[in-house]
Image (tube, grey):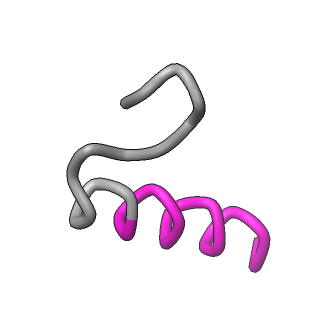
Amino acid sequence: IKSGGEYLDPTAAAAAIEAVANQGKK
């Protein structure tokens, strides 16, 4: 992860976004 918050791995970024989205559904 870059200091600016950008993910070097698009797959990891997508997984993180999905995790946050799942938390929001609870």
Magenta-drawn stretch contains 13: no
Identify the residue at horizontal 26%, vertical 44% (top origin).
8
Magenta-drawn stretch contains 18: yes
Residue toward you, 7 or 16: 7
x, y percent for residue 9: 21, 52
Question: Please, is residue 1 above or below residue 16 in the view?
Answer: above
Q: Which region shows up in magenta? A: 14-26
Question: Please, is residue 18 above or below residue 19 in the view?
Answer: below
Identify the residue at horizontal 53%, vertical 65% (top origin).
17
Residue toward you, 4 or 24: 4
Tell how many labels: 0
x, y percent for residue 2: 42, 27
Tell me if 24 is positioned left or right of 3 in this view: right
Tell me if 24 is positioned left or right of 9 in this view: right
Tell me if 21 is positioned left or right of 14 in this view: right
Q: Quadrant of residue 1?
A: top left
Identify the residue at horizontal 38%, vertical 58% (top origin).
13
